[in-house]
Image (spheres, rainbow, N blue to C red):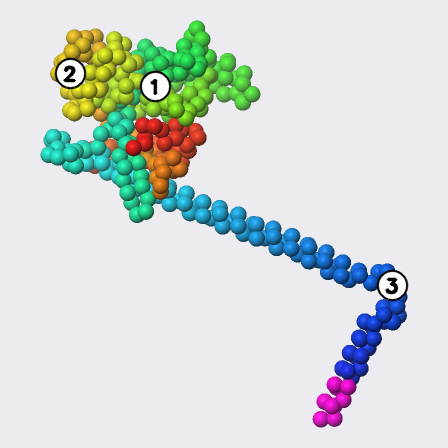
Amino acid sequence: MKGAASLPKAEDSAMEAGKRRGTKAGWEDRGYPQGKRGVALLTVIWVLTVLMVIVLSFSFMARTETLSTLAFKEGTEKRFWAEAGLERGIWELFYRKTRSNPPLSEEEAPWKIDGTPYKGQIGQGNYLVRIMDESGKVDLNTAPEQVLRTLITSLVGEVTDADALVDCILDWRDKDDLHRLKGAESDYYESLPKPYKAKNGDFDSLEELLLVKGMTPQLLYGEKNKKGLADFLTVYSRTNRVNINTAPKEVLLAIPGVSADMVEEILAYRKNQEIKNLQEIGGTVAQNQARIFPYFSFAPVGVFTVESLGFKDTPRAGYKVKTTVALTADNRYKTYYYKTPVTIKDEEGPSETALP
Ligand SMILES: [Ca+2]
């Protein structure tokens, strides 16, 4: 008890000493001149400022993180909605295969495979799916030269020397090292800053076209309101004909001997039924059938591209995925190509044809 009683006394005397040090006499005692008495306050303000800057930068970082997490979440959602659309598209292909008889009603009818967009809903999201028959496109490796030339000229002739582009594509593909008039072979490609050789073999993918002299992503994928070559070319049909039931207008027009009137007749006829021969279309198509027949087939070869756009409110802010699949005999499918995302910038975006 004695010790405990003496302790407060010792504390008291220490406090007294502290108080004394805080007095004017105290500062002077410790050798601070009178003019520097605000230095502690200044230090405190500085420390507070530095702390505020740190806190503000932390809060800014946290906000950025939150926003990027939200964007990631939305992007992931859209991606899975798009993936769902892709699965649906493939499922529709199998359904189509089993529905060889004419459908009883509109709902029973299988989806069209000419790029017609179909909309679906899953959870809180939506998808927009298009199926394209690869045999409705022009095969880059097997198409007759005239078809390739007419198609490419009609699509990009306004912005580039289409003849030179076609010459370079054919030179890239042919086995020899002999230049066409405006073509390019290994000697040109080896003179580039990053040299490589001409393939002298078939194209394995459309992207390979970007290695060919004169080809640009804009020409291949199209720009905002202009379609690119990729919508009309393929490496998967492996035939020199195009499917008259699914070929886009641009491809039909590239067929030698096919006029704009014939294209209208074909499009009008196939709207309601499948074309089985040229005779049944009648009109100018039937009159010219002998001439144009060698360029056409009437059924798909079984390779399809499914393109799906996942979105919440507007397709313009969507996420797009694309796959090319081949249906195999055992009711399975093989994936030849898959791309995610097909970004709005390097592809035609949710192109006008993909919008509802
Ligand atoms: Ca060559």
Q: CA distance from mark 1 to mark 2?
A: 28 Å
Mark 1 vs 3, N-terminal side = 3
Give the quarter of the image for residue 32: bottom right
Q: Residues within 10 Å of mark 3 (few under 14, many from 20)?
A: few
Measuring 30% from the left and 25% from the top, which residue is drawn there?
Answer: 236
Image quadrant containing the N terminus: bottom right
For label 2, the crowd category at 10 Å Cα-Cα, with few meaning under 14, some 14 to 19 and many 20 or more, is some
Q: Does any portion of residue 239 appear in the rendered image?
A: no
Quadrant (top left/top right/bottom left/bottom right) for the C terminus? top left
Q: Residue at x 40, y 29 (%)?
A: 347
**Image-based side of 132 in relation to 72, left or right:** left
Most foreground residue, 216 or 273: 273
- Residue 336, compared with residue 258, is above or below; it is below
Residue type indicated by callout 2: Ile
Q: Which mark is residue 34?
A: 3
Q: Is residue 356 magenta?
A: no
User: Which residue position holds label 2?
Assistant: 281
26 over 245 or under it: above or below: below
- Residue that badge 1 annotates: 140
Question: Mark 1 vs mark 2: which is more N-terminal?
Answer: 1
Q: Secondary structure at mark 2?
A: helix
As drawn, 103 above or below 282: below
User: Disc 1 or disc 2, which is closer to the eye?
Assistant: 2
**Amino acid beneath label 3:** Gln
In magenta, the rendered stretch is 1-9
